[in-house]
């Protein structure tokens, strides 16, 4: 395992972009990601920030809170990442969220329910980790 000081990047780590409307929850999620020895490459609070940060940081995964992204916005995000090999982990407080389940079933199938548990986060990250 390689550790580059300053950037704190582990060679086995996954680069994750957090797209969450609640800043405090974003910070908690960031700490969980770092505790699992992965890298948080940014915190996005709008569809435009998600697209810009995705282009600038090329994350391996985006944890996407569905409560502030509608179906049209999701299409824009998916179009941005389709050539980047970036996975989406959908998150929501509502397990019946149509965007979450419908889209998760049709694309990656990755889903994280709130409140976030580190065991669930670890499980979803393991599903997207390159072999």
Image: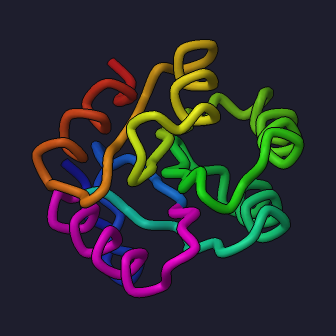
**Could you tell me residue 19's position as x and y percent?**
58, 63
In the depicted view, which residue is nearer to us: 68 or 1?
Answer: 68
Q: Which of 44 and 55 is in front in this view?
A: 44
Residue 29 falls within the magenta-colored stretch? yes
Magenta-drawn stretch contains 72: no
Q: Residue at x 11, y 45 (%)?
A: 119
| Residue at 82% over, 65% down | 52
Left or right: 68 with respect to 21? right
Left or right of residue 70, residue 123 in this image: left
Q: Residue 22: x and y, percent?
A: 50, 79
Q: From what the image shows, is residue 130 above or below residue 96? A: above
Q: Quadrant of the C terminus?
A: top left
Q: Toward which corner of the image does residue 114 lie, by quadrant?
A: bottom left
How far across and how far down the image is residue 42, in percent?
56, 72
Q: Which of 48 and 52 is in front in this view?
A: 48
Q: Which residue lies furthest to the left in this view?
A: 119
Instruction: Provide residue 51's location: percent of width, then percent of height.
Output: 80, 57
């Amino acid at each position: 395992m390689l550790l580059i000081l300053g950037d704190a990047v582990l060679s086995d780590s996954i680069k994750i972009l957090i797209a969450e409307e609640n800043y405090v929850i974003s910070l908690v999620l960031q700490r969980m990601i770092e505790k699992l020895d992965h890298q948080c490459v940014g915190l996005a609070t709008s569809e435009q920030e998600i697209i810009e940060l995705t282009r600038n940081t090329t994350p391996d995964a985006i944890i996407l809170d569905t409560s502030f992204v509608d179906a049209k916005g999701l299409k824009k995000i998916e179009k941005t990442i389709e050539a980047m090999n970036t996975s989406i982990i959908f998150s929501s407080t509502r397990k019946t969220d149509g965007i979450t389940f419908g889209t998760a079933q049709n694309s990656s199938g990755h889903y994280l329910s709130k409140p976030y548990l580190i065991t669930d986060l670890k499980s979803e990250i393991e599903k997207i980790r390159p072999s």
